[in-house]
Amino acid sequence: ERKAAALERTKGSEILFGVAPCWLALARARRALFRLFLKEQRGGPGRPLRAELALQAAARGVPVLHVPGRALDALCRGRPHQGVCLEAAPLPFRSLRDAEEPRPGDGESGERQLLWLVLEHIQDPMNLGALLRSAYFLGVDRVVVTHSNSCPLTPIVSKASAGAMEVFDVYSTDDLQGFLKAKSAEGWEVVGTASRPEDVEGVPVISCSEFRWDKPLIVVIGT
């Protein structure tokens, strides 16, 4: 009974699972963190990592519970948790209205033009997570999603992103058309993507090898 009570969820919380999402959520603390759950295990190759996670949690004032593997399975509904789960508040999108407006030419390290990625109608959490992971790795400066028809920032998205979601601000807009028109008027290049030129009508098509990136760029992906 004591174990059952200990695993009762905090109202409104969600369960992050997997080493990378939990590690980065603890390191960045961008959301409220309630409890860290670690698999009960004597020795083994994962012991130093679990000890480090426990130290991180203690430094943040997050209680640490050591529980059987089946309890972790139940918490994350059988998903691959790698012996680690973290109870946390949901991570919301950031509003573009609250975002600091960068200046053209302020790309990563100041060595290139800005690059923003706009994701329209991405509803599959695995796809959204993979896109965030790639965007973070490739140095995209900002990701913007359409708020009304996109997948929320769920634990599955965090896991699929290899934890990038925990360190990468994701912004949302309710007026994508207005946002793109405004940025275009400010001198940004707005481009879409297509696998074949014949799939596109009414707009110019250029290959990636011929494209000149000489102004701040917004790449739109989605439907």
Image: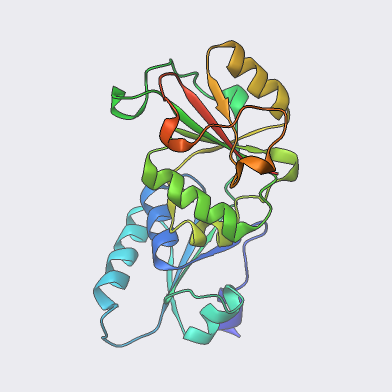
Residue 122 is left or right of residue 30, and the answer is: right
Residue at the far front in the pictured view: 198
* Quadrant assignment, res 76: bottom right
- Identify the residue at image location x=32%, y=58%: 56
- Between residues 6 and 194, which one lies in front from this camera angle? 194
- Identify the residue at image location x=61%, y=76%: 77
Q: Is residue 124 above or below residue 17?
A: above
Residue 131 is left or right of residue 110, and the answer is: right
Quadrant in the picture for the C terminus: top right
Residue 175 is left or right of residue 80, and the answer is: right
- Between residues 40 and 130, which one lies in front from this camera angle? 130
* Quadrant assignment, res 73: bottom right
Q: Where is residue 124? Give x, y as percent.
A: 65, 57
The answer to whether residue 120 of the structure is visible from this angle is no
Q: Is residue 152 above or below residue 204?
A: below
Residue at the far right in the pictured view: 148
Q: Is residue 214 above or below residue 198?
A: above
- Identify the residue at image location x=64%, y=16%: 182
The answer to whether residue 119 of the structure is visible from this angle is yes
Q: Is residue 218 above or below residue 88?
A: above
Q: Where is residue 167? Give x, y as percent.
A: 42, 45
- Between residues 96 and 179, which one lies in front from this camera angle? 179
Number of marks in picture: 0
Q: Where is residue 188? Give x, y as percent.
A: 53, 18
Quadrant in the picture for the N terminus: bottom right
Q: Where is residue 109? Give x, y as percent.
A: 28, 28
Q: How is the image coloured?
A: rainbow
